[in-house]
Structures are given as C-alpha cells and as structure tokens.
Amino acid sequence: MLATPTIESPEEAARRAKESTLLSPRFYTTDYAAMNRIDVSSIRAEWDAMLAEYEGDNNHDHFQRTPEFTQEVAERFSQVSPELRQEFLDFLVSSVTSEFSGCVLYNEIQKNVENPDVKALMRYMARDESRHAGFINQALRDFGLGIDLGGLKRTKAYTYFKPKYIFYATYLSEKIGYARYITIYRQLERHPDKRFHPIFRWFERWCNDEFRHGESFALILRAHPQLISGANLLWVRFFLLAVYATMYVRDHMRPLLHEAMGLESTDYDYRVFQITNEISKQVFPISLDIDHPAFRAGMERLVRVKIRVDAAKARGGLVGRLQQAAWAVAGAATFARMYLIPVRRHALPSQVRMAAAW
Ligand SMILES: [Fe+2]
Ligand SMILES: [Fe+2]
C-alpha cells in the first residue's frame, strides 16, 4: 500500500526522512524567550524527583548492540516478504525522524535558555532522544540505509510552534510513543515467534524514557493551569484529534507490519488510544470519545481519503491535481466533523505523576 519508490537506497531513505507532508514527522522551532519564563515552583517537589530520575540515568547501558542482534537480523529478518520489509523500513525511517526531531528541538531549547530548570530537563531529554535516534539509525545501517542526521538537521524544513503548542504536541507524542512501544512489546512478549526483528526487544526500557519525557511536559502543563483550561481546551482537543488521526492514517498505510506481529492496525490503534486517553487524564480535563460510532467512522473515512489523495497524486496532471484538492477538502471536512463530537470530561488528579503500568 506504500507509495513507490521503495526504500532500497540511502538516497530514498534520506528523501523520506526529509519530506514534509501533513503526516510526516516534523522538525520544530519555538519562542525561546517564552520557554525561558517557564516557572515550575508550584510543582517543585515532583519536578525535583523527576530530575533526579534523569540524573540516575537507568537506561545509560540499554542502547548497545549485542552480538545476537546482528545474528537475529540475519536469521529472522532475512525471511520476511519484500512488502513487509518495505513497511518495516518505512517504520524505521519515520521513527528515526521523530526521535531525532525531539533531539533537535530539546537541544535547541537547551542551548537558548538560561532558566536552570528548563535547561537541565532539555539536556536530559536530548540525551535520551539522541540515543534512541542513534539506535534506530544503526538498525538502518544494517541495510546500508543509515540517515545522515547532521545533514537532515541542516536541510529539513522547520515548523514554528508557540511554546503552548509545543507542550501539547510533545506531551502527546511522548505518551502515544510510550503506548505504541509498550503495546508492541507486550504483544511480542506473548508471541516471541512473531518478533521478526530484534529491535522490538529494546522497546520496554526504551518506552520508559518516552513515558518520563511525557511526565516532564505533564508537570510543565500542570504548573501553568491556564494552558489546560478555558479556551485553551479547544487547542487541547485539536491536538488530541490531530495526533490520533495522524497515527491512525499512517498505521493503516502499513497493515502488514501489524499483521506480522499478530496485531491488526485498527485494533492496535484503539488499544494505543485507550492507553493514551487513560494517561492524559493526568493533565487534560477532557478526552476524546474514541468509542463514539462517528469517531470510528471518521477515522475510517480519513484512511479512505488518504488512499484517494495518493491515487490522485499518482495520476498527476490537471485532473489529478483537482482530484487531490477535492479529496483534501473532504479530509478537512471529516476532521472538522470529528472535532465536534462531544468529549468526555474529568477532574484532574491532585498528584500529577503516574507509574508506567502498562
Ligand atoms: Fe525517544
Ligand atoms: Fe521522547
């Protein structure tokens, strides 16, 4: 189901990492002066405990290749079909891009602020994301498809986001990242015969880093209650839907990847939404009604629209362009209707931090 050309050369891998579409991982810049003014004094005790965890660095030895890694790639991954291979490579390229996106953003904030709380946090998170990106890139190098991350940093387009949008978007992407990795890890723990690549064995300790990164943004948001109340809840709602919809459409473009793990894309995605909804109650007083029939129908329609947009793009010419525009409007209208589905409301817990218990 993936668009051609296939990822068989480092040039194509680099092109995929660099591409800017509605669905591809982006690089961000923000307002560093505003970041400098973040005040965590109202949640100081929880903040300091969290920074002590980063300092302790319990994953410092986790992202190392073992001799079995290479052996497992040779024995098991060489057996997979060319179609699954492509979907997996697409997964690795988009994952390394989003890990590195976090690394670049956190590192830029760290360099541009004086605020010691923010600086320390960003330095730790950039450290973690750089390990994550490096580890995936090594897996890509096994196939001669390593990405030049320095080059990507220089040439990829950057999107400017106000700090509050950075907080909503990164909070959600860290927590959804945790939910995605832990769901895969648990599935393959139950079905080790379906672990067709060794990288999945690293996901458990890996996703604890993502969980903690999400906790950091949860604390920042809770320290600034105006960001999670009043009119800003309209933004929260927008980001929840945007993050969920992007994931759903992307995942449905690679059904074989989930099938190979004994999962089904729709079922997998709803498990991930369920976990993310549970976690995000720590910080958002609203959550999306993922069981609403109109929500489910809307997600399916977005996938169909994406398939039509790709077909129109492949067709090209004036007709192709017109069709593409028409389907883009249909996609936006579907998104708008989903945005209007009533949300669930809940009170925020007095203690912000929670355990990664999935
Ligand atoms: Fe990461
Ligand atoms: Fe992260």
Image (cartoon, grey):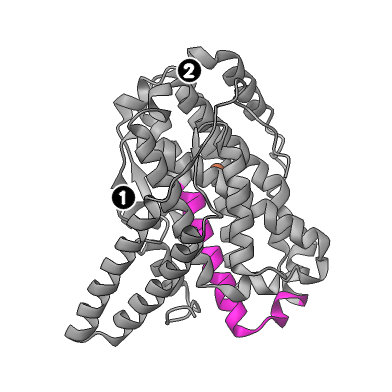
Q: Is mark 2 within 8 Å of ligand 2?
A: no
The crowd level at tag 1 (other Cα within 10 Å; few <14, some 14-19, many 20+) is some
Q: Is residue 140 above or below residue 153?
A: below
Q: Nearer the viewer, mark 1 or mark 2?
A: 2
The residue sitting at 60% across, 84% down in the picture is 82
In the rendered structure, which amino acid carries the disc numbered 2? Val
Q: Which residue is mark 2?
A: 40
219 displayed left or right of 358: left
Is residue 100 at all visible to an observer of this figure?
yes
In the rendered structure, which disc, 1 or 2, sits on the residue that comes first in sequence?
2
Q: Nearer the viewer, residue 321 or 20?
A: 321
Q: Is residue 214 above or below residue 149?
A: above
Is residue 119 at all visible to an observer of this figure?
no
The residue sitting at 62% across, 72% down in the picture is 257
Q: Is residue 160 magenta?
A: no
Q: Quadrant of the C terminus?
A: top right
The crowd level at tag 2 (other Cα within 10 Å; few <14, some 14-19, many 20+) is some
Magenta residues, as a range? 75-101
Q: Which residue is mark 1?
A: 158
Helix, strand or loop at mark 1? strand
Where residue 132 sits: x, y (%)?
A: 59, 49
Q: Determine the CA span between mark 1 and mark 2.
A: 28 Å
The residue sitting at 46% across, 28% down in the picture is 221
Q: Quadrant of residue 236?
A: top left
Q: Nearer the viewer, residue 128 or 345?
A: 345
Q: Nearer the viewer, residue 265 or 134?
A: 265
Q: Nearer the viewer, residue 183 or 333?
A: 333
70 displayed left or right of 87: right
Q: Is residue 97 magenta?
A: yes
